[in-house]
């Protein structure tokens, strides 16, 4: 393990308490999105990092125990939002609902932090808004700019916020989708956002919701890009300490279970919605402030591993072949912790061209395009590694007629879905 590329967290990212307690320990992995070229695979240089989760004993915020250098994770990124029909539809519905709910006027500036290929901003642009993206992944920001979505290939900081305010004006809406769990300097980014806001401004961000992870055993959403595993109670307390108000929270289905958080300045115009306290009470009731209960999560993960292995062993004992479908970042955690290596999975199909003809982190399983499925001999089973999109993937594969075998869903409870 290369300690120059990571450090061990010593204080809570939200409340700064030093009382951090380990509750989850998973197999060490490389960066989950670090898919390798053939040359990189043969060179054998692949840093791996500890993968543990700590809870703050003061505010109950969950966070990784070790932080990997963000340049190692994000500067050459392989995820693009536009390859997922589910994402595209989600962002379009999101833009429509937010513009309508808050009566955002045409021509208003919409700023998206961690804007990726601009899929979210494109939905606002089509509705007459001015748009600006910020994303440190230079290769992905280039795609966005080529597609007409102005994107700054930088990390979002106080200095950049001041520059945006001077060059572009004050945004009516600042958004972020499944990005702020990736930010080490969370308070710094939030204070930078605050600089861009007035009493009428909105900051709306979506992050994965640990309640869904906990209830559904979606442990593979734990990986090095995700530094934080958010719940409402610590967020509410945090925003109060910096003069901001979390006034409304929606649960949404995207990414297997997320929360959409609505934030304004303390003297903002929106009334606090009952959803905030309702979710805080739900979190207490289910045990998300109980260290012993969260530790039992790991035991359930191990039980699921044993159950899946029983299914896979029976398939392999019958001399049947298995391929994977989907190579999301979470698949690195799933495959490494569950030992889903090349003796089990022959290859993985992914629709993202940036990942095709590369190899999965550490286990080095080839990533191919879906045309491979139509070639003989076809695999007998497809294990859906992008399980949160399982329904749409199975529907697409069946409609296109490229696969006639059966499907395996690994989480939360492993199961086989019959094909044709």
Image (spheres, helix red, strand yellow):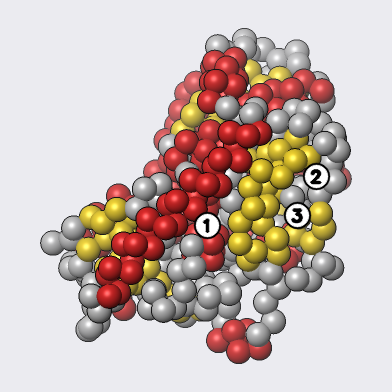
Q: Residue at x 13, y 62 (%)?
A: 420
What secondary structure is marked by label 3?
strand
Q: Residue at x 71, y 15 (%)?
A: 268
Query: Taking 161 as reference, is 136 left or right?
Result: left
Nearest-to-viewer mark from 2 and 1: 1
Which quadrant would residue 244 be assigned to in this image? Answer: top right
What secondary structure is marked by label 1?
helix
Q: Residue furthest left?
A: 420
What secondary structure is marked by label 2?
loop
For marks 1 and 3, give the CA distance: 17 Å
Q: Is residue 380 visible?
A: yes
Query: Taking 329 as reference, is 415 left or right?
Result: left
Q: Residue at x 67, y 77 (%)?
A: 46
Q: Please tell me which residue lies in front, 201 or 391.
A: 391
Instruction: Indicate which disc residue 185 carries.
Output: 2
Circle 1 residues within 10 Å: few <14, some 14–19, many ≥20: many
Reading the chain from its start, which is encountered first: label 1 or label 3? 3
Q: Which residue is tagged 3?
A: 66
Q: Quadrant of the N terminus?
A: bottom right
For marks 3 and 2, give the CA distance: 14 Å
Nearest-to-viewer mark from 3 and 2: 3
Q: Is residue 171 visible?
A: no
For marks 2 and 1, give the CA distance: 23 Å
Q: Which residue is tagged 1?
A: 330
Instruction: Indicate which disc residue 239 carries.
Output: none
Reading the chain from its start, which is encountered first: label 3 or label 2? 3
Q: Eyeballing the image, is 378 above or below 399?
A: below
Which quadrant would residue 194 be assigned to in this image? Answer: top right
Q: Eyeballing the image, is 308 above or below 358?
A: above
The image shows residue 229 at horizontal and vertical percentages of 63, 40
The image shows residue 324 at horizontal and vertical percentages of 37, 68
């Amino acid at each position: 393990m290369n300690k120059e590329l990571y450090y061990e967290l010593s204080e809570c990212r939200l409340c700064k308490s030093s009382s951090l307690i380990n509750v989850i320990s998973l197999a060490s992995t490389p960066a989950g999105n670090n898919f390798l070229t053939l040359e990189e695979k043969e060179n054998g240089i692949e840093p791996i990092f500890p993968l543990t989760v700590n809870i703050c004993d003061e505010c109950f915020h969950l966070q990784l125990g070790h932080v990997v250098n963000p340049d190692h994770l994000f500067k050459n990124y392989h995820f693009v939002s536009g390859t997922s029909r589910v994402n595209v539809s989600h962002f379009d519905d999101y833009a429509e609902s937010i513009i309508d709910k808050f009566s955002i006027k045409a021509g208003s500036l919409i700023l998206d932090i961690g804007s990726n290929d601009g899929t979210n901003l494109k939905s606002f642009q089509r509705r007459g808004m001015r748009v600006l993206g910020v994303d440190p992944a230079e290769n992905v920001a280039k795609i966005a700019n080529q597609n007409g979505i102005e994107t700054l290939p930088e990390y979002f900081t106080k200095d950049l916020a001041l520059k945006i305010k001077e060059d572009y004006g004050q945004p009516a809406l600042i958004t972020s989708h499944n990005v702020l769990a990736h930010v080490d300097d969370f308070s710094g980014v939030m204070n930078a956002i605050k600089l861009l806001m007035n009493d009428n401004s909105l900051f709306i961000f979506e992050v994965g919701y640990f309640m869904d992870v906990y209830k559904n055993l979606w442990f593979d959403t734990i990986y090095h890009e995700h530094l934080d595993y958010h719940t409402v109670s610590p967020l509410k307390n945090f925003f109060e300490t910096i003069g901001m108000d979390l006034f409304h929270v929606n649960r949404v289905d995207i990414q297997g279970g997320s929360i959409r958080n609505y934030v304004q300045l303390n003297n903002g115009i929106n009334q606090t919605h009952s959803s905030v306290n309702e979710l805080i009470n739900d979190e207490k009731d289910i045990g998300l402030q109980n260290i012993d209960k969260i530790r039992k999560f790991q035991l359930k993960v191990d039980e699921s591993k044993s159950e899946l292995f029983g299914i896979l062993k029976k398939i392999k004992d019958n001399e049947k072949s298995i391929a994977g479908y989907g190579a999301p970042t979470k698949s690195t955690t799933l495959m490494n912790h569950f030992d889903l290596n090349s003796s089990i999975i022959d290859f993985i199909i992914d629709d993202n061209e940036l990942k095709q003809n590369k190899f999965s982190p550490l286990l080095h399983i080839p990533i191919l395009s879906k045309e491979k499925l139509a070639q003989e001999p076809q695999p007998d089973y497809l294990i859906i590694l992008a399980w949160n999109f399982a329904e749409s993937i199975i529907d697409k594969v069946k409609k296109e007629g490229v696969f006639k075998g059966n499907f395996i869903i690994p989480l939360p409870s492993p199961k086989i879905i019959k094909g044709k």
